C-alpha cells in the first residue's frame, strides 16, 4: 500500500481525516477534509468534489489502521491515495499543529 511519512507532507497537500467526530472535535490538522470512516461510502461524493483532480489524497486517522482501509478503497476507485504512516499521533509528536474547529490548540484523542 502506498504510504507517506508525516515529515514528508507539505502544507498544501490535500489531507483526508477519517477519524470519528469526537476525535476530530478534540483536534485535527488545519485545512483537512473530515469524512469519518463510518460514513465514508455514503459521503464519498464529498471527497470527489473537494479533492484536487490531478493531485494526491493523503489519508490520515489516529495511527494508520483506518486510513489504510480507506486508502485501499480509494486506490481501487482509481484515485491516487496514500496512507499517512503514524497518523495524527505522529503528526502531533513531530510538532505539526493540531487545532479545533474554532482555531484553538487541540489534541489527539
Image (cartoon, rainbow, N blue to C red):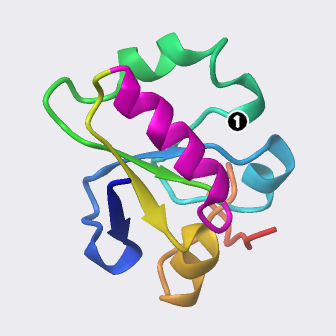
Q: Position of residue 12 (x, y in %)?
A: 25, 54
Residue range of the region highlighted in magenta in the rendering = 62-77
Chief SS of the magenta region: helix
Q: Nearer the viewer, residue 71 or 15?
A: 71
Q: Where is residue 28 in the image (x, y as percent from the top left)?
A: 62, 59
- Residue, disc 1: 36
Residue ID at (74%, 73%): 107
Residue 98 quadrant: bottom right
Residue ID at (49%, 87%): 95
Q: Nearer the viewer, residue 67 or 35?
A: 67
Residue ID at (67%, 72%): 105
Q: Nearer the viewer, residue 94 or 64?
A: 64
* Mark 1, other Cα within 10 Å: few <14 / some 14–19 / many ≥20: some
How many marks can you see? Answer: 1
Relative side of 89 to 72, left or right? right
Q: Where is residue 70 in the image (x, y as percent from the top left)?
A: 54, 38
Secondary structure beneath dot 1 equals: loop
Quadrant where the image shows the C terminus? bottom right
- Residue that sits furthest to the right in the current view: 22
Confirm whether the magenta stretch covers residue 87.
no
Confirm whether the magenta stretch covers residue 76.
yes
- Residue that sits furthest to the left in the current view: 54
Q: Nearer the viewer, residue 105 or 87?
A: 87
Seen in the picture, residue 74 relative to 85 is either above or below; the reply is: above
Amino acid at each position: 500500500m502506498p504510504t507517506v511519512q508525516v515529515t514528508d507532507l507539505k502544507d498544501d497537500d490535500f489531507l483526508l481525516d477519517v477519524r470519528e467526530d469526537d476525535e476530530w472535535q478534540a483536534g485535527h490538522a488545519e485545512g483537512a477534509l473530515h469524512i469519518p470512516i463510518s460514513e465514508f461510502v455514503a459521503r464519498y461524493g464529498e471527497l470527489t468534489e473537494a479533492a484536487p483532480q490531478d493531485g494526491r489524497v493523503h489519508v490520515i486517522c489516529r495511527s494508520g489502521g483506518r486510513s489504510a482501509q480507506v486508502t485501499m478503497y480509494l486506490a481501487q476507485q482509481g484515485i491516487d491515495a496514500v496512507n499517512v504512516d503514524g497518523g495524527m499521533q505522529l503528526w502531533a509528536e513531530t510538532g505539526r499543529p493540531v487545532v479545533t474547529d474554532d482555531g484553538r490548540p487541540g489534541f489527539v484523542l
